[in-house]
Amino acid sequence: GENVEQHPSTLSVQEGDSAVIKCTYSDSASNYFPWYKQELGKRPQLIIDIRSNVGEKKDQRIAVTLNKTAKHFSLHITETQPEDSAVYFCAARGPGSNTGKLIFGQGTTLQVKP
Amino acid sequence: SQTIHQWPATLVQPVGSPLSLECTVEGTSNPNLYWYRQAAGRGLQLLFYSVGIGQISSEVPQNLSASRPQDRQFILSSKKLLLSDSGFYLCAWSVWQTLSYNEQFFGPGTRLTVL
């Protein structure tokens, strides 16, 4: 089955700097890769996602890139702000099933220092 | 628009007591439904998922069970809670459509403490 590895587990940056979180997946047939942000005590919120037929997607200060050959995808946050501090989870979903199951990475705790 | 509800929001239960957590979805039909558990400071562990009424798949062996008595209702239960059952329980939903990619959305969660 699919396996998703996420790095780093913790990341500390200064406000205004960029942050990059990387995930690798094992199943080359996976075709959907969402990213979730979870603030302390809250539910995970979908912040951006990418399909396997696209190499990059941007939404204001966040972007996701996908390298299907290498089987990895990354979340890029530019001009970080203190409110970006949270736990970020990547996930992957394989094709061919109507279950919609997502396989999650272990999470990255991002701390943005003012 | 679609919304998802979970209750209760918090729960403190003694070891050995029963458990019933409820999740309901509004504004959609025939959703896929999921139960996750998140231990303190940890990742998301998929416990159960359901693609239709009465259809439950278990991802991990445990003393929990799930049921789906109605299309938009998903229930997580236990007959006897263990200390290790403490955690943040999240319900999620997605809708399967041909050639779709099934964005998955989470409910507000139930924080369970077993003492």
Image (spheres, grey):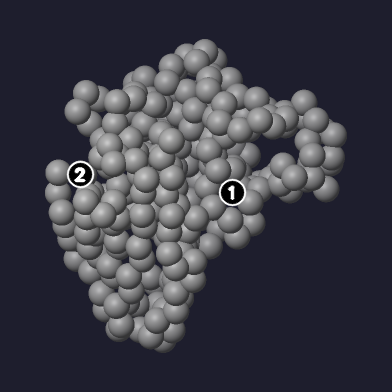
Asked if marks 2 and 1 fall on the same chain, the answer is: no
Q: Is residue B22 visible?
A: no
Name the residue type under label 2.
Answer: Ser
Image position, residue B71 (x, y; %): 44, 17
SS at badge 2: loop
Q: Chain of mark 2?
A: A
Residue assigned mark 1: B38
Name the disc covering residue A52, or none: 2
Image position, residue B2 (x, y; %): 34, 34
Quarter of the picture containing the N terminus of chain B is top left
Name the disc covering residue A77, or none: none
Name the residue type under label 1.
Answer: Gln
Q: Nearer the viewer, residue B50 or A114?
A: B50
On screen, A71 above or below A30? below
Q: Is residue A30 visible?
A: yes
Nearest-to-viewer mark from 2 and 1? 2
Rendered residue at 25%/74% (across/down): A78
| Residue found farthest to the front | A69
Q: Residues within 10 Å of mark 2 (few under 14, many from 20)?
A: some
Image position, residue B40 (x, y; %): 64, 56
Rendered residue at 58%/20% (across/down): B67
Rendered residue at 29%/41% (across/down): A28
Q: Chain of mark 1?
A: B
Disc 2/disc 1 C-alpha distance (Å)? 28 Å
Q: Nearer the viewer, residue B17 or A50?
A: A50
Q: Is residue B87 left or right of residue A77?
A: right
On screen, A39 above or below A4? below
Instruction: Give residue A36's quadrant in the image.
Output: bottom left
On screen, B62 above or below A46? above
